[in-house]
Amino acid sequence: MKLTYEDLQMLDGKQGEARRRAMEGLVQLGEAFGAEDMVSIGYAHVHPGMAMYAQDVELLEELVDLGAQVVVPTTANVTNVDTENWRQTGAPESLARVHMRGVRAHKALGCVSAMTCTPYWAGHWPTWNMHMTSIESGVTVFCNSVLGARSNRDGFFSVYAALTGRYPRFGYHLDENRVGTHLVTVEASLHNTTDFSCLGYHLGPLVGTGVPVFTGFARPPTLDELDALGAGLATTGGVSMFIVPGITPPYNSTDQAMAGAPAPVELRVGGSDIDRVYGSFASAPPGSRVDFVHIGCPHASFQEMKEYAALLSGRTVHPDVEMWITTSGAVKALSAREGLISTLTDAGARVITDTCPMSCHFALTTSPDPGIVLPEPRIRRMVVDSAKQAKYTRDMIRCQTLLTTTAAAVATATSGRLVARGGSPG
């Protein structure tokens, strides 16, 4: 690789052991993917130090002991524990203690402890053509596809990039990889974020690691719908970028998105395809009793919090149901100032930050550090409004998982019985 004088200074240890290790790792990554040189990044969304795995936290603490500091604006991804209210989620104290060590380490490194999978709703908004790094697949898709930033789906290398301000030039940092591979004509009527998450979920296996270009939307999707679409694509596929001409910078037409070439693959998505996704998470009939409802995946935006408050205003969560609304601490703070949190909690919902059902201590498929004993989750039947959360809840918590729209999920929470899409309690 062609390294700058500054890169070589870091690689030779002239800027400390932490940056030497970080640059060494980035060089190895670049060589593995055939990168010719490095780019300078302007933002990093990094590993939070998952408390269930004490070694993750210890690695961050080791970097702190070496005097490491991030050199670009850096946020932490969603983690295992609600930092302020871990008791209300039922998290064991041993897990919370390890989590707090991770929070302290992040602060010492100079990171923002955002602990969210949607840092853009918390004010971290990378600009067009900014090179960045992200450990969270949903963040990668949104920033590439909606903001026009440049990011790969990274692992712990995101921390190394934050410490050096550098990243190997490969993948979606190159213009030639930011070109459409599939032309998708949407013939289905899409009405809400759940529908858009189902669209992405359906297409993920068909697109793989490609770049789908969308046409046929009846109206321009909202930011929340674009977020849901990307999350669905990244759940069932390896998608890091999609293109909606007229929205994704700088593409104004399908021809431009395809670089003037015919579409290699053409796909059509109809209403029956969306129905099949809902149907794959319909293992109980409408009217069935439920004990858990979750909305806010990916972590809710302020606009979504307003929607939830409007839906729950004047209603009460059924006593047999636990309802979680997950968002970032920043969005929760703004929502509290606008009076939304009191509306939600007065109705009986729990507003959770920093984590979510599939990331917290509910996950049965997780093998935590031997010093942490996780309680058995007492969830039999969970209702969600996100195809992403539906898949991971079913896979990781191993409870019966049912997918419906946000409005129907709220109706389910207040009635205690499953309300299907467009339906009413049985």
Image (cartoon, helix red, strand yellow):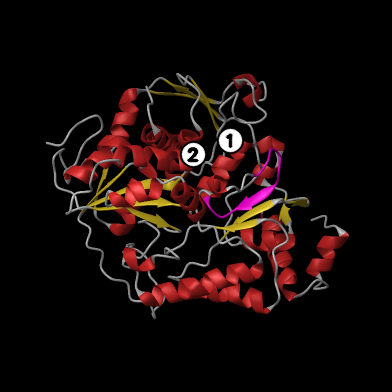
Q: Residues within 10 Å of mark 2 (few under 14, many from 20)?
A: many
Quick check: is 349 in the magenta stretch? no
Numbered badge on residue 146 = 1
- Give the percent coordinates (x, y) of residue 224: 47, 36
Overall secondary structure of the magenta stretch?
A: loop
Task: Specify the quadrant that holds the N terminus.
Answer: bottom right
Q: Nearer the viewer, residue 54 or 182?
A: 54
Q: Is residue 122 left or right of residue 27?
A: left
- Taking 14 as reference, is 311 above or below it? above
Q: Give the magenta part as a residue range.
A: 126-136
The secondary structure type at the circle numbered 1 is helix
Q: Are the residues at dot 1 and dot 2 in contact (C-beta closer than 8 Å)?
A: yes
- Give the percent coordinates (x, y) of residue 169: 72, 49
Q: Nearer the viewer, residue 71 or 87?
A: 87
Q: Nearer the viewer, residue 189 or 316?
A: 316
Numbered badge on residue 227 = 2
Q: Residue at x 56, y 26 (%)?
A: 264
Q: Residue at x 71, y 57 (%)?
A: 72
Q: Is residue 160 visible?
A: yes
- Give the percent coordinates (x, y) of residue 149: 66, 41
- Taking 75 as reference, is 241 above or below it? above
Q: Nearer the viewer, residue 231 or 154?
A: 231
Numbered badge on residue 269 = none
Q: Residue at x 50, y 24 (%)?
A: 220
Quick check: is 134 in the magenta stretch? yes
**Gap in Å between the C-alphas at discs 1 and 2?**
9 Å
